[in-house]
């Protein structure tokens, strides 16, 4: 009898340990859980810690409490300006209601298949109502925000919350890329030719205006120079006349000296003149006085 009691003690401890292990469970801080009883949900746990459940006939389903990523396949969409583009996007979501999540989609694989249809439908609706240039501009943020709002409204039925939605890339289909690039190149070349023509027109107007101003300035300068030259000649003639009137002999001598300097100042000068020419009037006397013909 005593041996049976001694033998039954360890067995009781083991049984109690097994019962305790089946009753106690922990929820990690990155998890949330649903306590199930015979396939029916009984309790939802969203806070980390140590919890107790009924042994054996209750089990625990764990769900991730972190933000999860999902990237649907790239979709080919036609924009409002009839541009065919390939849109590559991704979604970040969190399981907000584990019970509704379990009842609607059960697993992450299930929610991703359902979420893909919602994302594609919203993409086609929002991007299809936008033009190609807006998707490549600052309006892209508004487009992504609208898609996130639409997807989030539908995702509440699955017990999840859409934390973020992003369009990663927007490409042209391979079949249309070359033709679109060529059309864009042709358009840019046409604009470049138009700008060059406008620039050439403006340059021609500037050159014509500058040439006209140059002609006017030169004409006015020549006019002013002629006036100044005439005034100078008049002053010179007046001065010569006054000097001639005061001392005719000196004036004749000065004019003859200028003539000698201009005629005889250069090297290898040859003159053929008569000895009694007026040019040699001041050569006839050693004192430099002018001589008259016949003297």
Image (cartoon, rainbow, N blue to C red):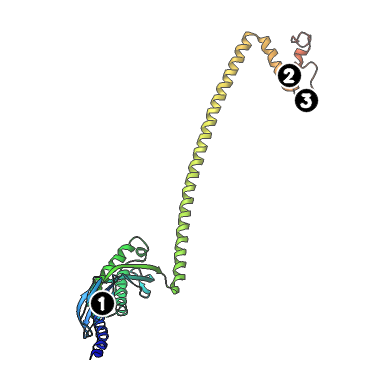
Crowd class of label 3 (few under 14; some 14 to 19; many from 20; radius 10 Å) = few
Q: Which disc is residue 25 wearing? A: 1
> Is 284 placed above or below 132 here?
above
Indicate whether 2 appears above or below 104.
below
Residue 267 image label: 3
Indicate the secondary structure of the residue bearing disc 1: strand
Q: Which residue is mark 2?
A: 260
Which of discs 2 and 3 lies nearer the camera? The answer is 3
Where does the image place residue 160, in percent across and percent down from the top left? 26, 73
Residue 165 image point, x, y percent? 32, 68
Q: Secondary structure at mark 3?
A: loop
Quadrant of the rendered image containing residue 261: top right
- Of labels 1 and 3, earlier in sequence is 1
First of labels 1, 2 by sequence position = 1
Q: Name which residue lies at 45% across and 73% down.
A: 174
Horizontally, residue 253 falls left or right of residue 110, namely right
Residue 140 visible here: yes
């Amino acid at each position: 009898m005593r041996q049976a009691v001694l033998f039954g003690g360890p067995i009781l401890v083991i049984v109690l340990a097994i019962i305790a292990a089946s009753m106690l469970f922990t929820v990690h801080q990155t998890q949330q859980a649903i306590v199930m009883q015979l396939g029916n949900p009984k309790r939802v746990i969203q806070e980390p810690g140590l919890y107790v459940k009924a042994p054996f006939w209750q089990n625990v389903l764990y769900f991730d409490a972190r933000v999860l990523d999902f990237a649907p396949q790239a979709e080919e969409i036609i924009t409002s300006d009839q541009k065919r583009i390939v849109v590559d996007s991704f979604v970040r979501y969190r399981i907000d209601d584990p019970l509704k999540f379990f009842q609607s989609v059960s697993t992450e694989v299930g929610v991703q298949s359902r979420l893909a249809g919602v994302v594609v439908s919203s993409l086609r609706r929002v991007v299809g109502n936008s033009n190609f240039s807006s998707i490549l501009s600052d309006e892209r943020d508004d487009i992504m925000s609208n898609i996130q709002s639409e997807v989030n409204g539908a995702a509440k039925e699955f017990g999840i919350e859409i934390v973020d939605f992003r369009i990663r890339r927007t490409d042209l289909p391979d079949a249309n890329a070359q033709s679109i690039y060529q059309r864009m190149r042709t358009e840019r070349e046409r604009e470049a030719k138009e700008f060059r023509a406008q620039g050439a027109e403006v340059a021609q107007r500037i050159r014509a205006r500058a040439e006209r101003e140059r002609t006017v300035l030169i004409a006015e300068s020549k006019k002013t120079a002629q006036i100044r030259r005439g005034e100078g000649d008049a002053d010179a003639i007046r001065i010569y006349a006054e000097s001639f009137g005061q001392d005719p002999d000196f004036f004749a001598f000065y004019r003859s000296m200028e003539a000698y300097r201009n005629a005889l100042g250069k090297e290898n000068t040859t003159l053929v003149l008569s000895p009694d020419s007026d040019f040699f009037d001041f050569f006839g006397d050693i004192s430099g006085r002018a001589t008259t013909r016949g003297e």
